[in-house]
Amino acid sequence: MLLIRAGIASVLLAALAISPATASTTHKASTTGHAKSLHKKKPAKKKLHGQQAIEPARVIEIQQALIRERYLTTEADGRWDATTIAAMQKFQADHGWQTKLMPDSRALKTLGLGPDYSNAINAKNSSFADPPPITTIPPAQAQGFATAAGVNH
């Protein structure tokens, strides 16, 4: 009887040792309700940011400014071509600015083509004139400015 018990015990131990190795995993169904698709997904298109092209009217303005500054010798035709790009790169390089992004905002401002604020919401009542001469400022106010600035006037 002892021999039978020992045999049964060894069979049970062997069964317990083998069961984790042969256990199978069960597949749990998706809870989202979506079946897996076997179709390949299309690669996402790269989204382009910023201005993609320069309007021909603006190109003419830039070309005219480059002609005026003697960086461009052709006529202003409104095409952003290799000649115009080379002239702009030369202008920007001569001023110590980058030449990869064109046109650079500093270059446009230097060429006199910066932003136009004449139609701004607060431009109607504003004055872009020089400030009034110091003699028109009341003496007490002028003294206050000088004191605030730390200047003996």
Image (spheres, rainbow, N blue to C red):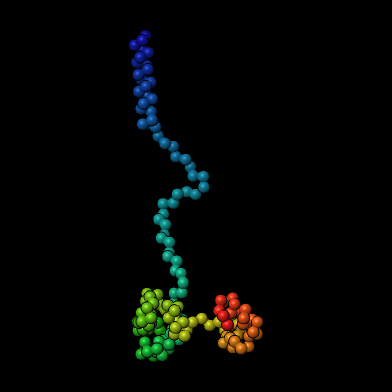
Instruction: Looking at the picture, tell me which residue is in the foreground, 57 or 13.
Output: 57
Residue 20 x %, y %: 38, 30
Looking at the image, residue 101 lies above or below residue 70: above
Quadrant holding the N terminus: top left
Residue drawn where x is 36% and y is 84% of the image = 87
Camera-nearest residue between 151 and 116: 151
Q: Which residue ends up furthest to the top in the rendered image?
A: 1
Instruction: Tally the marks.
Output: 0
At a point 37% along the width and 17% down the height, the residue shown is 9
Q: Position of residue 132 (x, y in %)?
A: 60, 87
Query: Which x, y percent locates residue 67?
Result: 39, 89
On the question of residue 122 being in view, the answer is no
The quarter of the image holding the C terminus is bottom right
Q: Position of residue 45 (x, y in %)?
A: 43, 64
- The answer, for residue 1, to whether it is visible in the render is yes
Q: Image point 64% across, 84% down: which residue?
A: 139
- The one nearer the camera, 149 or 19, is 149
Residue 22 appears left or right of 115? left
Q: Residue 98's image quarter?
A: bottom left
Residue 152 in the figure: left or right of residue 57: right
Residue at 37% x, 76% y: name it: 99
Q: Quadrant of residue 22?
A: top left
